[in-house]
Image (tube, rainbow, N blue to C red):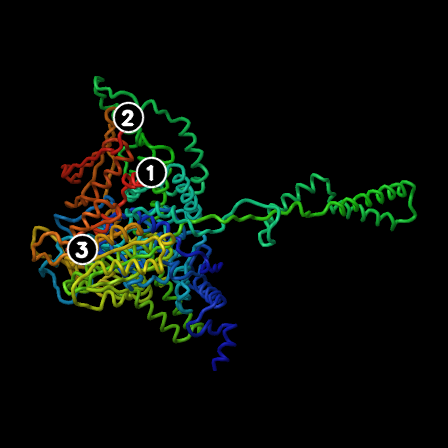
């Protein structure tokens, strides 16, 4: 019987049997999956590149947030060690796939995977994630997938050359300080977004050379004009405008205006800034990205089975694997957040259901998509136009909330207890949805800091403000270290005020001085 | 779509980054390594092992908020029993737990509170013995230059074919060919081709006949020169030359001498053992070949194997000089001092029969000390319950130590002291080192 089956694999029969894979099987699976993805699901993807790696190499990939290369820094070593330990102690199974938002889109397949897992990963990463990377608006606006690998190559080389020229310690000092400010290295609210990384590399050297030539050390040596008349207010305003204040992108500000940095130091800050910008959209899209990829692979594996391309055993294995990934532990298991695979997948499935088979409730909650008969078009639209926060706000349905048995706690530090103030019932749906959505708002991940003033006519004190959220101050130890690093980059005193946004009251004030004098 | 098999690509891309992380946390790692040794895991330590360091040694700071006061909402999943208005006791761990607070509290690595480094044997020992060195090592090494090893010593005109330096030979050959004007074989081939072509095409014009004549002439000249000037001539040949250079001897022998008489309790023996192990690991790191000789003594001394040395109890009185005699006997028979670096570690509780002490002193000072690189004497003391003065042996040794820099004596009463004492004995002392040499 198996002989007959094998013969059939050449045509439209089974793609493979058993767990063993080889390159021909991977190619056949890819072709079959591609056909479903493009013809049936209408996915639009970057060209794919599939790389087969060992588990050891997977650990390497993990260390650099999925990037195949990066510059050398001890923090990468630290991540490597902690992943390695978790893996060796069996705390962490290796994710069976990592995919890179690049063009071509690189997916890693681990050699230990079974044939079914390879097919599943191709569907998940090479089509699900890939489609999402290419089509989501946030990714389109913020990242430049065609150049990221080249840019990383450039960054690696540049930093290695700096280490040769100026010593590893000097470079590390800049990198450490800049890494601490990574989350303050993005123009979140202004228009400047996507950067042409190719031009970056070409211009980098030229720009630095020019600045080297035109830099004049003289102005640094000007005596502090104590006797001078205090500058008038409109002069200060003009200066503030010149420096583009207020400025939320601290790394950008330092790169442009820090008076004491050498050209190569500015370039290193720029490298850290551009790389962190590349990663900026990812945490805001994790839920949707995983939901999309999981939904796509689930759908494709189901279709492969329906079409008779994989056997029952393989299909069971795929279901088993999907089920593992989308497990949502409850609060009793100590879970304090939602598994993005679980919630994302549940929401995608729910949207598809509402489109074709809506209940009365769905018609009330999402009248614009209920029963529109076009689940794929609706999903593709959502994948392209939303980010996690707005997606939850728009699409989290009562049914999913019930499925997850969601409830909301009010944590008021003045009270000795936590209050359950909403559960998955008619009164609670909207409250719960609002809170879940808010937890995906990027302003909850990142502290909102701004450079508000620089005393350029006086002692060059740099003044920052942190607008706190409901009494949440910055973690103090970390803040002090980061502020010291910032002062070292700036070269002069730095003051940070934490203010209560509504009242404008200053809750706390910190300062740091540059540690290396003149 | 393309498939690339990366499995054969080099692994361990992050070894350099790992090394940097280790360097950055060097102090913490060193502390961890020494703690591991203090806890008596030296034997495993020698094999390389894992150490954990606190996470803050590798902390990466950032600006991030923490929830300390005020109010916030958290949505959780898995509600089975709550209805609106229920009040729940705060989970232990306080307000920091739960909701997005956990995500903010630390970056990558989640709740990791420590990092484990798997250290190779060399890394471990490097860290462990970071600032230690062997006293007097240099001096003795220069004195014992018995072993020779071949080392490169330029080129020569003759030698064995296996040592032919092809690159240089060809360079000389080319220089000679250019200098003597050896024609290129291509030129000859070209002329022959032309001649063949002319010979084919008949009838020949007068000009052709002339040209043929010239070409034939040229051909014979070229052939002659080609034959006369060889491609490679014996004068071109160059061979790599090796000379035998003396090398400092790097063999060492370590004598472990321990009192196993009745007065030595198990605990005291254990302390001594710790010290021997440390010294063993330390010496092993410095010497390619290290022999260890175990000598135990009570009333008489004997050379035993490691197992017996540490684990086989004996009882009886104590005569230290017998051990030194045994040591000298073994040394004379197997470890001549001009070939071997000799180290001695002696552990005892300080008991010795009174009549024997002068003899011990005599043997030590004139017999043993001139032969050895370093002699460490560790006196292990009881649990401290008995307050007593210096022992006989200790007083004697102290006198000798004052005259001999390479005899070191220390008292140890607790396991924790072993390593500090060890470090003290072997700490780098550049000043005295210079003066001694």
Query: Circle 1: is it few (<14), some (14-19), or many (20+) Cα within 10 Å?
Result: few
Provide the secondary structure element on which disc 1 rests. helix
Look at the numbered discs 1 and 2 and tell me whether their residues touch, using CB distance below 8 Å. Answer: no
SS label for mark 2:
helix
Picture coordinates of residue A355 (x, y %)? 32, 63
Closer to us: B236 or A411:
B236
Q: Please check whether the numbered discs 1 and 2 fall on a single chain.
A: yes
Chain ID for label 1? A
For label 3, the SS is helix
Give the x, y percent position of residue A328: 25, 64
The reply to whether residue A439 is visible in this rendering is no
Which disc is residue B139 wearing?
A: none
Q: Residue at x 41, y 33 (%)?
A: A208
Q: Position of residue B273 (x, y in %)?
A: 22, 60
- Asked if residue B344 shows in the view, the reply is yes
The residue lying toward the viewer, choosing from A422 and B141, is B141
Foreground residue, B421 or B215? B421
Determine whether, in the image, residue B27 is placed left or right of residue B267: right
Q: Outermost residue, bottom direction?
A: A1
> What crowding class fits label 3: few (fewer than 14 Cα within 10 Å), some (14-19), or many (20 or more)?
some
Q: CA distance from mark 1 to mark 2?
A: 35 Å
Question: Tags 2 and 3 in contact by the CB under 8 Å rule?
Answer: no
Identify which residue is drawn at 19% across, 68% down.
Answer: B314
What is the number of the mark on residue B357?
3
Q: CA distance from mark 2 to mark 3?
A: 92 Å
According to the picture, the residue beneath numbered tag 1 turns out to be A170
Instruction: Indicate the quadrant where residue B323 lies.
Output: bottom left
Residue assigned mark 2: A238
């Amino acid at each position: 019987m198996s002989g007959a089956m094998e013969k059939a694999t050449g045509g439209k029969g089974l793609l493979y049997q058993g767990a063993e894979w080889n390159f021909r099987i991977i190619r056949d699976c890819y072709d079959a999956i591609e056909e479903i993805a493009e013809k049936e699901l209408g996915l639009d993807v970057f060209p794919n590149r599939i790389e087969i790696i060992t588990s050891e190499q997977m650990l390497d990939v993990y260390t650099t947030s999925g990037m195949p290369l990066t510059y050398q820094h001890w923090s990468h070593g630290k991540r490597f060690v902690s992943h390695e330990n978790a893996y060796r102690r069996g705390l962490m199974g290796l994710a069976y796939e990592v995919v890179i938002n690049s063009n071509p889109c690189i997916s890693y397949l681990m050699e230990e995977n079974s044939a079914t897992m390879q097919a599943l990963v191709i569907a998940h990463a090479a089509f699900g994630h890939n489609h999402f990377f290419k089509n989501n608006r946030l990714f389109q606006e913020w990242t430049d997938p065609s150049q990221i690998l080249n840019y990383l190559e450039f960054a690696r080389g540049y930093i290695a050359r700096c280490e040769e020229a100026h010593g590893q310690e000097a470079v590390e000092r800049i990198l450490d300080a800049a890494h601490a400010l990574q989350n303050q290295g993005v123009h979140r609210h202004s228009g400047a977004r996507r950067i042409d990384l190719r031009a970056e590399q070409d211009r980098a050297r030229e720009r630095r050379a020019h600045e080297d030539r035109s830099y004049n050390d003289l102005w640094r040596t000007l005596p502090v004009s104590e006797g001078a008349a205090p500058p008038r207010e409109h002069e200060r305003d003009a200066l503030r405008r010149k420096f583009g204040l207020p400025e939320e992108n601290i790394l950008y500000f330092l790169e442009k205006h820090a008076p004491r940095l050498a050209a190569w130091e500015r370039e290193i800050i720029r490298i850290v800034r551009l790389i962190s910008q590349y990663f900026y959209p990812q945490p805001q899209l994790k839920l949707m990205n995983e939901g999309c990829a999981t939904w796509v692979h689930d759908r494709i594996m189901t279709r492969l089975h329906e079409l008779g391309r994989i056997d029952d055993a393989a299909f069971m294995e795929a279901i088993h694997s999907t089920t593992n990934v989308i497990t949502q532990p409850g609060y009793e298991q100590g879970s304090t957040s939602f598994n993005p695979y679980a919630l994302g997948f549940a929401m995608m499935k729910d949207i598809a259901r509402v489109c074709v088979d809506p209940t009365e409730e769905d018609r009330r909650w999402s009248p614009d998509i209920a029963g529109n008969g076009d689940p794929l078009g609706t999903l593709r639209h959502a994948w392209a136009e939303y980010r996690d926060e707005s997606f939850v706000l728009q699409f989290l349905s009562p049914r999913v909330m019930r499925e997850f048995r969601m409830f909301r706690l009010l944590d008021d530090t003045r009270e000795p207890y936590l209050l359950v103030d909403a559960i998955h019932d008619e009164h609670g749906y909207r409250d719960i949805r609002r809170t879940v959505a808010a937890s995906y708002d990027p302003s909850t991940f990142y502290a909102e800091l701004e450079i508000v003033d620089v005393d350029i006519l006086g002692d060059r004190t740099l003044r920052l403000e942190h607008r706190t959220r409901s009494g949440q101050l910055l973690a103090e130890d970390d803040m002090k270290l980061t502020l010291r690093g910032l002062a070292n980059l700036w070269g002069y005193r730095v003051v940070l005020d934490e203010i209560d946004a509504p009242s404008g009251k200053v809750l706390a004030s910190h300062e740091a001085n540059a540690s290396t004098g003149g | 779509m393309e498939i690339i098999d990366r499995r054969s690509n080099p692994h361990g891309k992050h070894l350099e980054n790992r090394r940097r992380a280790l360097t950055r946390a060097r102090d913490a790692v060193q502390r961890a390594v020494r703690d591991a040794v203090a806890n008596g895991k030296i034997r495993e330590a020698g094999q390389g092992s894992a150490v954990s360091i606190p996470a803050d040694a590798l902390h990466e700071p950032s600006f991030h908020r923490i929830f300390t006061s005020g109010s916030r909402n958290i949505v959780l999943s898995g509600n089975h029993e709550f209805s609106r208005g229920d009040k729940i006791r705060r989970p232990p761990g306080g307000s920091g737990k739960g909701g997005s607070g956990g995500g903010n509290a630390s970056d990558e690595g989640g709740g990791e509170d420590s990092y484990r480094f798997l250290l190779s044997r060399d890394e471990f020992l490097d860290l462990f013995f970071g600032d230690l060195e062997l006293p007097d090592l240099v001096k003795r090494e220069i004195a014992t230059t018995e072993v020779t090893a071949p080392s490169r010593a330029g080129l020569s005109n003759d030698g064995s074919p296996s040592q032919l330096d092809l690159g240089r030979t060809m360079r000389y050959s080319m220089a000679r060919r250019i200098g003597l004007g050896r024609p290129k074989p291509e030129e000859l081939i070209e002329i022959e081709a032309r001649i063949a072509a002319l010979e084919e095409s008949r009838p020949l014009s007068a000009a052709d006949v002339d040209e043929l004549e010239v070409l034939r002439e040229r051909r014979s000249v070229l052939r002659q020169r080609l034959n006369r000037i060889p491609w490679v001539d014996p004068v071109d040949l160059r061979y790599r030359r090796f000379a035998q250079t003396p090398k400092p001897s790097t063999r060492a022998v370590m004598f472990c001498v321990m009192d196993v008489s009745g007065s030595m309790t198990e605990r005291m023996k254990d302390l001594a053992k710790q010290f021997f192990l440390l010294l063993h690991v330390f010496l092993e790191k410095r010497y390619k070949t290290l022999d260890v000789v175990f000598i135990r003594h009570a009333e008489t001394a004997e050379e035993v194997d490691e197992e017996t040395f540490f684990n086989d109890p004996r009882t009886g009185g104590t005569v230290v000089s017998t051990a030194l005699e045994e040591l000298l006997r073994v040394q004379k028979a197997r470890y001549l001092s001009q070939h071997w670096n000799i180290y001695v570690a002696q552990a005892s509780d300080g008991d010795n029969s009174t009549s024997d002490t002068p003899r011990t002193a005599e043997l030590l000072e004139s017999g043993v000390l001139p032969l050895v690189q370093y002699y460490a004497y560790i006196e292990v003391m009881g649990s401290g319950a008995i307050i007593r003065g210096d022992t006989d042996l200790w007083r004697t040794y102290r006198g000798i130590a004052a005259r001999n820099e390479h005899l070191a004596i220390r008292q140890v009463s607790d396991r924790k002291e072993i390593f500090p004492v060890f470090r003290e004995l072997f700490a780098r002392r550049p000043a005295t080192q210079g003066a001694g040499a």
